[in-house]
Amino acid sequence: MNTSLDIKKTYKLYIDGKFSRTESGRYIQWVDSKNNQTINFCHASRKDFRNAVQASRNAFNNWNNFSGYNRGQILYRIAEMLDSRKEQFISELILQGKSKKKSIQEVKQSIDRLVYYAGWSDKFQQIFSRVNPVSTPYYNFSSPEPTGVVSVIAPKNSYLLGFISVIVPAVVGGNTVVVLASEDNPLCAISFSEVLHSSDVPNGVINILSGYCNELAGHFSSHMDVNAVINCSSDLKDSELIRKNSSLNVKRVFDYESIDWTHVDSQDPYLIMDCQEVKTTWHPIGY
Amino acid sequence: MSENSKAKKNSSMSWKYSNALESIEHISISPVYKLFIGGKFVNPISKKYFHSSNPANEKKLAKIALAGKSDVNKAVLAAKSAYDNIWEKIDPKERGKYLFRIARLIQEKSRELAIIESLDGGKPIRESRDIDIPLAAAHFFYYAGWADKLDYAFPGRKASSIGVAGQIIPWNFPLLMAAWKIAPALASGNTVVLKPAESTPLTALKLAEIIQEADLPAGVVNIITGDGTTGELLVNNPNVDKIAFTGSTKVGKMIINSLAATKKKYSLELGGKAANIICEDAAIDQAVEGIINSIFFNQGHVCCAGSRLYVQESISNQIISKLHSRMDHLILGDPLDKNTDIGAINSKAQLKRIKMYLDIGKKDGGEIYQSKHSIPKKGYWCAPTLFTDISQSHRIVQEEIFGPVLAIQSFRTIDEVIAKANNSPYGLSGGVWTDKGSKIFQVSKKIRAGVIWANTFNKFDPTSPFGGYKESGIGREGGLEGLSPYVNIVNRN
């Protein structure tokens, strides 16, 4: 007999730069669209989320101080890594039920999107900063700074492109994120953590969970050390809960549910600005 | 020591100023104010009224209509119809011209407005005359110019108006806050229902008269007076598309909650507990003057007030003794006197709240210093107050007091003071005093707050964005950023 057994991969969460199992020990059994391959994803819990937020907060102070140039290079590095693994992501998308043509297109667009935002890393600040012409003898300027830790509920139906499109604008702006992958098809997002892991992204900047939205949306929006929530869930109950919980510590909430990520107009620096705070600094002029 | 005894000696000297009262003869306040809806002053369907009074002598100034549910609904429908039929369609440059007109009328009536502001709210005439009213006019003038230039404000995208903006403003800068709200909303093509604060409605109602005089199309701006219930009705009205609120973090959170099931947009300007950091290499006398301004401006009724003072240890005693001396020379009294530095506390309720915090501060072990003033018998007053011997966990360090009460702590290293400054749920403003440029950039970058004043404090300008990080709010007012809360970006797929 000359056959060799397949080596099946164990898929885990990605928290603080480590591939860890859920502390809950739970799993979600996923069967591919042709019903011949089964994967057990981690069923992330509230505790996993809290660990991820802690990692994000620690990472924020560091990532926020990276220069735009440096963040841009790291994002470009992610694009390079994704490009070198594109066959893997194409076959994963096919496994999740997309046509070959569409899968090839989606991976190509995903790489392009990373490159697009990589290029903004040291430019959006210039577009959105100003020296304000005040009418008194003072000098002041306004410029954007990242909001902080952002929790993200990624799109259900755009497993790779949508996933990348919602996290990268926040990350390029210096925020750190905890993101819930598409609950129906988390495969690409979980695999993407391997891309991140080989891209010099500091630990904790991007944390990826697989799990259920209706279980985690409440925690994503009520955690007191999260500054903003990006919500792509189309479930009105989730959206309302998120908006309600955001009042606890005045989280910024962004609803990206209706954006078509395959469209070129779905990328713009205004999405970066959603998770930015404008700071104005004053100083007197005189001798 | 010599510094100390000198200060004490100075403080015992009595300074006499002749009265310099602003004349109130030429101003006009109606005995009754109705609701301004659809371009007319109309009787409230609620048939209810309340009084606005002068906090400096507790005398009633005017009877004010209290808008109930039907009134709020009527005002919102007037705004909606004005939006659908006129304001959304009008040539943007014409929108701008109306705003220019309003700016000019505010300038023309600035003396009257300043006096009424001081009568109604208790703030010193020097401040209403030199700050509130000129800035209000400047705000309209600034946003007027944006009306036909919005394409330049949002490069690469098209910005469109939202619809009816429900706006709720506080009592600390009544006319100025009305200007901050109305000007950008109108410039970007929205119509407005504005609710002024219960204790300070008069200048907003004078603004309604100005709006009439400017021939602004009926319903574009509606001004409805009332209390918290009126505000709540406005927030929950189904025909309001956007809420803009300035006030406490507590109410801001309630607003977020009640909008959760809707698609309404909101922008919030909430509370603060700003850290004002004095480094040992600062220009001491300028810093002392800056501290006085940071906390006693407008009786400390300022969301961005520098209410937490951090002084580097080596200069701490010197700063505190100079502060005592300076505080004793502040003039507290009639808001209409041009010499007055410290006016009246805005309302009885606010005075009660401040006194509660004075008690808490003392009970928690803080050392209190209050400047020596004779306090007028009538009205609501609070002498400028310092607390020392306190730490980060004290309630008077953590919570917003909104009064002339300063909590002083010392620090040794810059890293330590940055950690302390950021140890707050708020993030509206901050201050740093040093003669070293590199330190200014480092500290101002690390403080997580929307406005940083370096070697100055409490400066405002219509061109400059203002607003908070964290629980101090969402969105900016002023400057180009001030347009964003009033537009939707539309051509994104």
Image (cartoon, coloured by chain):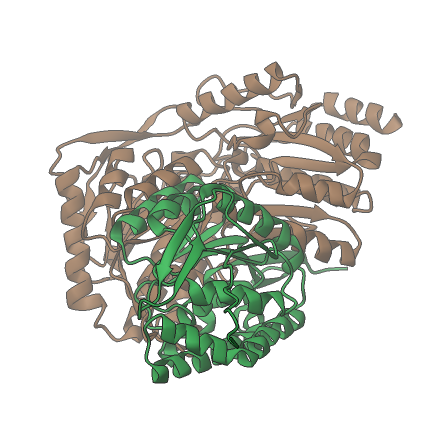
Chain colours: A green, B brown
Q: Residue at x 79, y 52 (%)?
A: B435
Instruction: Give how far across and how far down residue A55 sits, in percent.
Output: 59, 49
Residue A41: x and y, percent? 44, 56
Taking the view exactly as shown, the residue that stands out farthest to the bottom is A101
Q: Between residues B4 and A50, which one lies in front from this camera angle? A: A50
Residue at position x 59%, y 58% from top?
A205
Q: Residue A82, image x and y in percent?
A: 54, 76
The reply to whether residue A284 is visible in this rendering is: yes
Pick the residue in front: A250 or B314: A250
From where the camera sits, is residue B141 visible?
A: no
Quarter of the figure with the C terminus of chain A:
bottom right
In this rendering, is residue B79 above or below B152? above
Residue furthest toward the front? A1
Foreground of the two, A12 or B274: A12
Relative to residue B488, is residue A139 drawn left or right? Answer: right
Looking at the image, is B445 positioned above or below residue B473? Answer: below
Q: Is residue B35 left or right of residue A262?
A: left
With respect to residue B269, does A94 lie above or below? below
Query: Which residue in the rendered view is the most extreme toward the right?
Result: B2
